[in-house]
Image: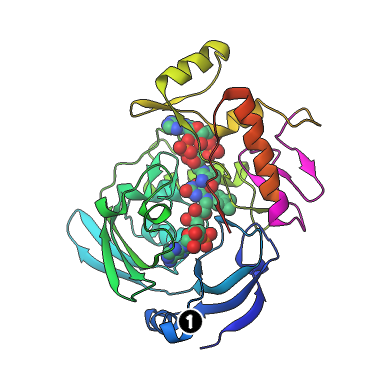
């Protein structure tokens, strides 16, 4: 096993933070992973998994062993006239898998095009975008328990998926390495174009009778316009979750801010965190949106995205997130929750 020592994680996180791992191992197969987790090698060290590093903020060096998941493979395990069931190995790139499915006409994840990261991380926060969530097509996953090295299957219900949430962010946090994810996709998909400006984008593309590929292309075009590209500027997408508040609290807010956007979420109301952030400001500037200090700040186009312009540290970005949370708390009495995993 080629375990590297004191290795910078700079190439392995999209925030481009330069913190090191005490030990780092790139894992290409389940067998390698199994051996890496041998208690004789691990000797009580903490184990962390990185896929694409697009949902972590490194605030310090990581003690223990970091496993970089590069386990690959795509297997069609069942096919009927209407559906196809596909098992994706956890180290596959999410967007590449979406493209693989779109090319073959398998529908259900086209609205999740261009989300960075790996298949194995997708269930962790039940990735979602443009009116779709992983849970809508998720059948099961296989995971290796870190302490016992036993393989376990989790069904959709057992994953306890919620809004950017799952059992792997709650009771099972840090206990499993996800090995593969099995999705059930449709060969005759009903396209979901109702969200936001997908339909408008399709119109602009001249697609009056859109295909699966057209919807994927529309999502990709919107995302490329609106979101910072981690290859250009360090970020981990939305830093905060959209808060879901009670109807009563929402009505009080709406009385004060009649233009506040909102989306019903069961009995409660989801309020865009970006709007809340845009309607508060730092002590020393007119707006959080576009706010910058040294190498860190808030993206000028996306108030939800905190960014590293060059050599910011994770703790500077974390401190910025604290200031934004306090600011929103004071203005609206709403506690923003971080979506990004803080290490
Ligand atoms: P990592 O950052 O490597 O890991 C994230 C967490 O999952 C860590 O706690 C890690 O330990 C754990 N983990 C990773 N792999 C495994 C595994 N195999 N087993 C067990 N634990 C594991 N998210 C959305 O939901 N919707 C979006 O639209 C979206 N857009 C984004 C846009 C941009 C520009 C960026 C930078 C991020 C965006 N994200 C979005 C966030 C992110 O891409 C997703 O959360 C993605 O699933 C993270 O995958 P990753 O492999 O990079 O995870
Ligand atoms: P947007 O379309 O400008 O909308 C702002 C927010 O309002 C979104 O976060 C969305 O919540 C909510 N919203 C808008 N239309 C909605 C509808 N019809 N029904 C329910 N909720 C609605 O958002 P954006 O920032 O450009 O992002 C577009 C999509 O990509 C969103 O789904 C967003 O979650 C996703 N995205 C996620 C990340 C991440 O890192 N998690 C990063 C970039 C983009 P939802 O977030 O619940 O959809």
Decide whether the magenta segment is chiefly helix, strand or loop.
Answer: loop
Q: Is residue 315 magenta?
A: yes
> Which residue shows up at 66% across the image and 62% down it?
60
Decide: is 279 above or below 37.
above
Q: Is residue 205 visible?
A: no
> Which residue shows up at 65% across the image and 43% down it?
321
- Drawn side of residue 42 relative to residue 291, left or right: left
Q: Which quadrant would residue 290 be assigned to in this image?
A: top right
Helix, strand or loop at label 1? It is loop
> Which residue shows up at 31% across the image and 49% down it?
160
Decide: is 288 above or below 310.
above
Q: Which residue is mark 1?
A: 43
- Drawn side of residue 57 relative to residue 127, left or right: right
- Drawn side of residue 124 relative to residue 140, left or right: right
Quick one: label 1, few (<14), some, or many (20+) residues within 10 Å? few
- Drawn side of residue 167 relative to residue 293, left or right: left
Tell whether circle 1 marks a residue whose Cβ is less than 8 angstroms from ligand 1: no
Q: Is residue 339 visible?
A: yes
Look at the image and give the residue range highlighted in magenta.
287-316
Q: How many marks?
A: 1
Q: Which quadrant would residue 79 be assigned to in this image?
A: bottom left
Q: Is residue 30 magenta?
A: no
* Color theme of the render: rainbow
Q: Residue furthest bottom?
A: 1
Q: Nearer the viewer, residue 117 or 108?
A: 117
- Residue 130 in picture, x, y percent from top left: 45, 40
- Residue 183 in picture, x, y percent from top left: 30, 58
């Amino acid at each position: 096993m080629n375990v590297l020592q004191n290795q910078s994680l700079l190439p392995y996180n999209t925030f481009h933070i330069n913190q090191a791992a005490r030990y780092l191992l790139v894992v290409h197969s389940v067998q390698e992973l199994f051996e890496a987790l041998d208690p004789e090698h691990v000797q009580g060290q903490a184990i962390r998994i990185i896929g694409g590093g697009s949902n972590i903020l490194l605030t310090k060096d990581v003690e223990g062993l970091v496993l970089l998941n590069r386990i690959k493979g795509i297997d069609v395990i069942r096919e009927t006239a209407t559906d196809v069931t596909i098992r994706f190995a956890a180290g596959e790139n999410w967007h590449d898998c979406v493209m693989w499915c779109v090319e073959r006409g398998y529908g259900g994840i086209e609205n999740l095009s261009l989300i960075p990261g790996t298949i194995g991380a997708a269930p962790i926060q039940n990735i979602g975008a443009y009116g779709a969530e992983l849970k809508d097509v998720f059948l099961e996953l296989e995971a290796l328990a870190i302490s016992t090295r036993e393989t376990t299957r989790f069904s959709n219900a057992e994953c306890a998926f919620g809004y950017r949430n799952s059992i792997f962010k709650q009771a099972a946090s840090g206990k499993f390495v996800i090995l593969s994810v099995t999705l059930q996709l449709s060969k005759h998909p009903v396209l979901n174009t109702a969200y936001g400006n997908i339909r408008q984008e399709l119109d602009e593309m001249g697609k009056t009778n859109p295909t699966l590929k057209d919807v994927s292309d529309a999502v990709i075009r919107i995302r490329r316009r609106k979101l910072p590209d981690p290859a250009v500027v360090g970020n981990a997408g939305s830093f905060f979750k959209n808060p879901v508040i009670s109807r009563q609290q929402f009505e009080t807010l709406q009385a004060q801010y009649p233009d506040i956007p909102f989306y019903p979420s069961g009995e409660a109301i989801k309020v865009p965190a970006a709007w809340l952030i845009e309607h508060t400001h730092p002590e020393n500037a007119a707006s959080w949106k576009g706010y910058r200090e040294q190498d860190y700040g808030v993206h000028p186009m996306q108030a939800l995205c905190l960014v590293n312009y060059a050599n910011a540290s994770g703790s500077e970005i974390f401190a910025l997130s604290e200031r934004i949370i306090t600011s929103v708390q004071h203005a609206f009495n709403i506690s923003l929750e971080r979506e990004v995993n803080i290490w």
